[in-house]
């Protein structure tokens, strides 16, 4: 358990009494001030990761841009941090366009994705001047040509299926043959030709993405050659997908190792004068945050269940992707009474399991429990199951903490009812 601290945001520590400190703030103070469950973001760790990606990419390919994959954590405050650190934003829906604009992004630095963009989303992109639309199919082109005003042009990339199957969960694979995302190279070639003759669209380049939570660099490199065979273009968006460290067993490549491999393949296959874009998401934000819960029930039997006041309402990663997390009793990461337990949530599903099999030190009702590495795909997939109120997001910085997203109220839950 002494290694548990290493899974929390960079800079986290234990106070003299063993209390977890994130962003300079004690976990017990955060729980007292903001309630539980609460998603705590260490702002310094978030900014440091953004700078690392930006600086490492620029050092290897000066004509380049890091674009944060907002879907991983589409909180306006998180997007604003990325904008302040000089990154662009990748969005995958109308709401993410609006929060990106609210965060202060230059719309020219937004890339819009999606395999089934609606008329409304296309209209929002055109209205707000989104810089690049990654078209996924010919229907995207139909909608754009019908929406972009006469006299204007919209820059587009065409998303390619590279035929690469990475070693990750099937639900987050995107570059394999048969993927719902993008086009096989022959279909892409025909769509490129159509776009090149469109008076309202400007063919800028190609996009590729092989999946998420990938802990091996080779699939990223393997995706570059299939893209290069479609010709030379001004822009190549090589996607994201680098994995994050959630557990003791995870050994994700460093940003430097990932980029050494990816840019090595780009130097081999792509024109030197092209602009490269990468879209880190999970690996940018996962380990910058932790969720603090309160234990509500301890039930000992054939299995010892430790139930907390959250669960699949604030973390669907386990139920959807079987993602493994770790956990510890706040103030007692180590000590007597360690027992192997299953941490479960409060929701009315047997699948509402946060951590199946984790050693906790003498868990009791009222204890605080912290789960590290909850910065990616937890906030964004939060839900109201069982009348659950979505949890707040707090930024912790140099010992000061502030709400950036408040907890939902009971009134919020019924605000959309019309009868």
Image (cartoon, rainbow, N blue to C red):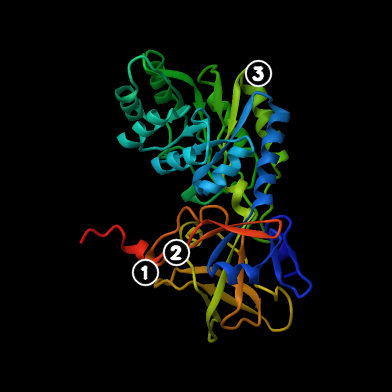
Question: In the picture, residue 125 is in which quadrant?
Answer: top left
Considering only order in the chain, which callout, 2 or 1, is on the residue closer to the N terminus?
2
Q: Secondary structure at mark 3?
A: loop
Residue at numbered disc 3:
272
Picture disc at residue 40: none
* Image location of residue 110, percent across then percent down: 50, 32
How crowded is the residue under tag 2: few (<14 C-alpha within 10 Å), some, or many (20+)?
many
Q: Which residue extends farthest bottom? A: 301
Please say whether residue 401 is visible from this viewpoint.
Answer: yes
In depth, the one of 314 and 268 nearer the eye is 314
In depth, the one of 121 and 174 nearer the eye is 121
Residue at numbered disc 1:
386
Picture disc at residue 313: 2
Considering only order in the chain, which callout, 3 or 1, is on the residue closer to the N terminus?
3
Q: Secondary structure at mark 2?
A: loop
Considering only order in the chain, which callout, 3 or 2, is on the residue closer to the N terminus?
3
Please say whether residue 175 is visible from this viewpoint.
Answer: no
How crowded is the residue under tag 1: few (<14 C-alpha within 10 Å), some, or many (20+)?
few
Quadrant placement of the C terminus: bottom left
Q: Answer whether labels 1 and 2 touch (C-beta < 8 Å).
A: yes
Classify 48 as above or below 108.
below
Foreground mark, 2 or 3, reads 2
């Amino acid at each position: 358990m002494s290694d548990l601290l290493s899974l929390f945001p960079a800079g986290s520590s234990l106070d003299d009494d063993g209390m977890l400190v994130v962003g300079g703030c004690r976990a017990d103070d955060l729980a007292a001030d903001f309630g539980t469950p609460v998603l705590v973001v260490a702002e310094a760790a978030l900014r440091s990761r953004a700078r690392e990606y930006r600086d490492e990419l620029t050092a290897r390919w000066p004509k380049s841009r890091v674009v944060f994959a907002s879907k991983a954590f589409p909180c306006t405050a998180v997007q604003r941090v990325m904008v302040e650190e000089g990154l662009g934003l990748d969005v995958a829906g109308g709401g993410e366009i609006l929060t990106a604009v609210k965060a202060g992004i230059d719309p020219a630095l937004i890339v819009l994705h999606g395999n089934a963009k609606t008329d409304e989303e296309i209209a929002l992109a055109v209205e707000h001047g989104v810089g690049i639309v990654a078209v996924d199919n010919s229907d995207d082109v139909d909608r754009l040509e019908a929406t972009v005003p006469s006299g204007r042009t919209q820059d587009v990339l065409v998303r390619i299926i590279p035929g690469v199957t990475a070693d990750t969960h099937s639900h987050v694979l995107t570059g394999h043959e048969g993927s719902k995302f993008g086009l096989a190279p022959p279909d892409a070639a025909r769509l490129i030709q159509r776009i090149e003759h469109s008076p309202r669209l400007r063919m800028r380049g190609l996009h590729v993405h092989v999946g998420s939570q990938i802990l091996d660099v080779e699939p990223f490199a393997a995706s570059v050659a299939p893209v290069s065979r479609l010709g030379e273009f001004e822009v190549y968006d090589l996607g994201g997908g680098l994995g994050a460290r959630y557990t003791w067993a995870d050994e994700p490549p460093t940003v430097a190792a990932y980029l050494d491999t990816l840019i090595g393949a780009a130097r081999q296959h792509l024109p030197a004068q092209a602009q490269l874009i990468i879209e880190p998401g999970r690996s940018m934000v996962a380990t910058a945050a932790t969720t603090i819960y309160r234990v509500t029930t301890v039930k000992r039997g054939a299995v010892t269940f430790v139930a907390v006041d959250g669960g699949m309402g604030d973390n669907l990663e386990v139920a959807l992707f079987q993602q493994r997390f770790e956990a510890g009793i706040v103030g007692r990461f180590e000590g007597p009474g360690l027992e192997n337990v299953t941490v479960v949530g409060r929701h009315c599903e047997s699948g509402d399991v946060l951590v199946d099999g984790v050693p906790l030190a003498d868990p009791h009702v009222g204890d605080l429990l912290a789960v590290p590495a909850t910065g990616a795909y937890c906030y964004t997939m939060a839900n109201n199951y069982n009348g659950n109120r979505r949890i707040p997001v707090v930024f912790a910085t140099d010992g000061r903490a502030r709400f950036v997203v408040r907890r939902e109220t009971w009134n919020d839950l019924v605000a959309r009812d019309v009868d």
